[in-house]
């Protein structure tokens, strides 16, 4: 079964810089307070290389889809793969400063200077994709206004660039990293479950 054209397009949106729904056994331990929000941010910003695996759930007013996620980040270089059910369809993205390549199953390969450029050029969408590099770690994107609510000195909710991000669960690593989050904007709901976080 092939994934829908909508999932292919949304794979670009998510892949080009990030990634959710449904998780298996939850191994998260109860949260414990960090010393302060400022010190927690400082620790998260040190994390610049990682390997993530998880799942994505995408819901619009017209459809619901799911896909698997693998994201390898090596400082400023990254490789992101999103695949539909049984490994079919989806997209692969590789990026470095000044160049991003997106290979979408059944639709071709696209290149551009940054993720936002590819989205606008191919789909006509203007989305702050690069911000997800920060959001996925539980940080607001820098140099942009935002509103937030903290719980145990970690983000519980974040509103930035027109998106509402709800942090539903954290893992037991130190510093604690998001395990489940939900992003919402204009009828698009993306639920992300990160089953594995490996810092490199």
Image: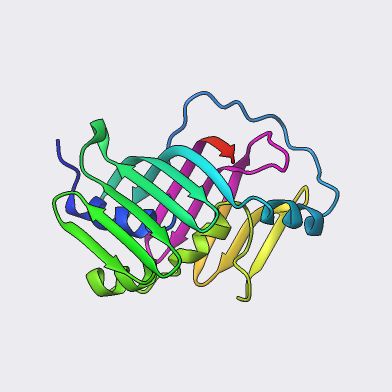
Q: How is the image coloured?
A: rainbow
Judged left or right of residue 88, residue 18 is right
Judged left or right of residue 149, residue 51 is left
Does the segment drawn in magenta span residue 55?
no
Residue shown at 57% from the left, 48% from the top = 49
Judged left or right of residue 160, residue 151 is right
Residue 62 visible in this rendered orientation of the protein:
no
Q: Position of residue 67 (x, y in %)?
A: 33, 41
Span highlighted in magenta in the image: 167-195
Q: Main secondary structure of the magenta part?
A: strand
Q: Position of residue 101 (x, y in %)?
A: 31, 60
Closer to us: 181 or 198: 198
The C terminus sits in image quarter: top right
Does the segment drawn in magenta span residue 173?
yes
Q: Position of residue 191 (x, y in %)?
A: 45, 47
Q: Position of residue 193 (x, y in %)?
A: 48, 40
Closer to us: 39 or 178: 39
The N terminus sits in image quarter: top left
Judged left or right of residue 25, residue 109 is left
Residue shown at 24% from the left, 54% from the top = 103
Residue 73 visible in this rendered orientation of the protein:
yes
């Amino acid at each position: 079964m092939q994934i829908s054209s909508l999932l292919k397009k949304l794979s670009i949106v998510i892949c080009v810089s990030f990634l959710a729904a449904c998780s298996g056994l939850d191994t998260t331990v109860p949260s414990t307070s960090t010393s302060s929000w400022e010190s927690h941010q400082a620790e998260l910003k040190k994390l610049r290389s990682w390997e993530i695996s998880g799942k994505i759930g995408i819901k619009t007013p017209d459809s619901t889809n799911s896909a698997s996620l693998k994201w390898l980040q090596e400082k400023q270089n990254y490789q992101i793969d999103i695949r539909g059910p049984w490994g079919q369809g989806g997209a692969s993205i590789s990026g470095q400063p000044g160049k991003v390549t997106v290979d979408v199953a059944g639709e071709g390969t696209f290149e551009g200077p940054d993720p936002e450029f590819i989205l606008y050029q191919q789909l006509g969408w203007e989305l702050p994709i690069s911000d997800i590099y920060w959001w996925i770690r539980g940080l607001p994107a820098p140099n942009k206004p935002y509103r937030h609510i903290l719980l145990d000195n970690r983000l519980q909710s974040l509103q930035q660039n027109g998106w509402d991000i709800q942090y539903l669960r954290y893992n037991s690593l130190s510093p604690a990293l998001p395990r489940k989050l939900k992003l919402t904007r204009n009828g698009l709901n993306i639920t992300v479950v990160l089953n594995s976080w490996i810092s490199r």
